[in-house]
Image (tube, rainbow, N blue to C red):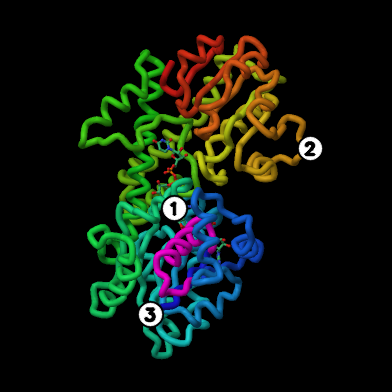
Amino acid sequence: MKICCIGAGYVGGPTMAMIAHKCKDHAVTVVDINQARIDAWNSDDLPVFEPGLDDIVRANRGENLFFSTDIDGAIKEADIIFLSVNTPTKTYGVGAGRAADLRYVEKCARKIAEVAEEGKIVVEKSTLPVRTAESVKRILESNCNGRKFQILSNPEFLAEGTAMQDLEAPDRVLIGGDQTPEGLAAIQKLVDVYAAWVPRERILTTNLWSSELSKLTANAFLAQRISSINAISALCEATGADVDEVAHAIGTDSRIGPKFLKASVGFGGSCFQKDIYNLVYLCEHFGLPDVAAYWNAVIEMNDYQKHRFSRRVLASMFNTVSDKKIAILGFAFKKDTNDTRESAAIYVCGDLLEEQANLAIYDPKVSSEQIHKDLGIDSANPYVTICKDAYEATKDAHAALILTEWDEFKALDYQKIYEQMQLPAFLFDGRNLLDLSQLREIGFEASGIGRG
Ligand code: NAD
Ligand code: UGA
């Protein structure tokens, strides 16, 4: 079969690379309007950093995996077309700040309707509000000239940083489609693609709306767990309980489970916040304000946590950070990715810049251009310096803040760091990565999230 994917981003690139890798019989073409991105996919410097991605792209590119800007050509040839374009929060008009902006998805549907010469299977890979397939179908069928399109929902559950592992051995693959003979046949075609490497019992099939809604619900539940443990972290700090001990104690209950209970400076990433806002908007749209308020609280708690962390830094440092050098260790929203979208670091740095601190920022994978862009400053801004490593960032600093849980921060020589910092030297571990008692033995005024 010929497979086309529109959107060569964090999802389209890795997902299609895995399909091409596992299904040598299918030719997979990933297309995008962004020429620079496609050029990067065709180069040695891929636009997405994911452990294991380079090897898979290198092994399959030019064989049965292609990256191109010829969108029309790829649509014409394809039997199955994945839509993997971005669905950010709308910033204008009705639903601004909450609803998903579906203009990119709609443009793709219109493009397919315009250029496809025969019927196709169109797969929603992007995260979409429930019932989007209805609009996609109407656009495709409004001028169909006898062509028959089948719309499937196949949301992606990969997490950044572990994308290749998640794609190779997913907990489940979810495929929703019309429960008609044609719909079921289309579902079966996509099941057959994944069945090349995913055990059949892990491939779930549902109706369209269940599949679309399951994606938003999964992200809302995951984010809710983080907000729940972060809420408890504030109570731990007030009472002397240790949030890691509490998380471990509750996580051993098999009904609760141990994952996603790591207290932090707040969840980031391109999806949790946008998808919950999307859910909140849908609930309001369907006349369910109490349900909307319930899920909105997950985001409010996350905002509280990010700013609570900054306030704690300020309070510990004698209520002033003005003119003090503060080392920021980590800027990505989690380890093993170069993605900074909605990273907690952006908010913490923003709070500290308002207090006129001097920030020395180091991240192993995020470029200085990206950091300047995220902070809304230009490279000449005297308050922000981008450093080449953690030692440079902490030299003569009054405090060090760990904001991303990069493994290399666990292996730093903290004795050396302490000796080159201003005294008293503060260390705020926003990811509970380090052993606080060891840091305190060195001489640091050290604190973590929910650990006193
Ligand atoms: P992204 O911004 O990295 O990539 C989207 C790509 O689509 C961009 O390169 C953009 O140029 C391209 N595009 C937009 N409109 C286009 C058009 N009309 N024609 C051709 N190309 C077009 O986004 P992403 O992170 O890959 O996310 C894509 C979708 O997957 C979103 O709905 C997101 O919620 C969902 N998702 C993301 C993740 C993740 O970890 N990032 C995980 C699961 C699901
Ligand atoms: C998340 C989901 O985990 C994926 O299943 C989903 O496909 C994806 O969103 C999406 O739809 O985009 P991702 O955002 O890439 O994946 O990464 P996560 O591992 O979920 O981490 C999100 C944020 O939560 C990070 O800032 C992370 O540091 C934080 N986090 C995670 C915690 O603070 N505590 C935890 O216990 C776990």
The image quadrant of residue 38 is: bottom right
Point out the stretch of residues depicted in magenta: 8-28
Cα separation between marks 2 and 1: 38 Å
Question: Residue sitting at 36 percent across and 30 percent down?
Answer: 229
Confirm or reject: label 3 Cβ below 8 Å from ligand 1: no
Task: Find out whether residue 263 is within the magenta segment.
Answer: no
Query: How many numbered marks are there?
Result: 3
Q: Secondary structure at mark 2?
A: loop
Neighbours of disc 2 within 10 Å: few (<14), some (14-19), many (20+) = few
Q: Secondary structure at mark 1?
A: helix
Type of amino acid under label 2: Ala
- State the residue in front, 273 or 152: 152
- Give the image location of residue 97, x and y in percent: 50, 49
Q: Label 1 belongs to which residue?
A: 164
Neighbours of disc 1 within 10 Å: few (<14), some (14-19), many (20+) = many
Question: Residue sitting at 39 percent across and 38 percent down?
Answer: 298
Type of amino acid under label 3: Phe
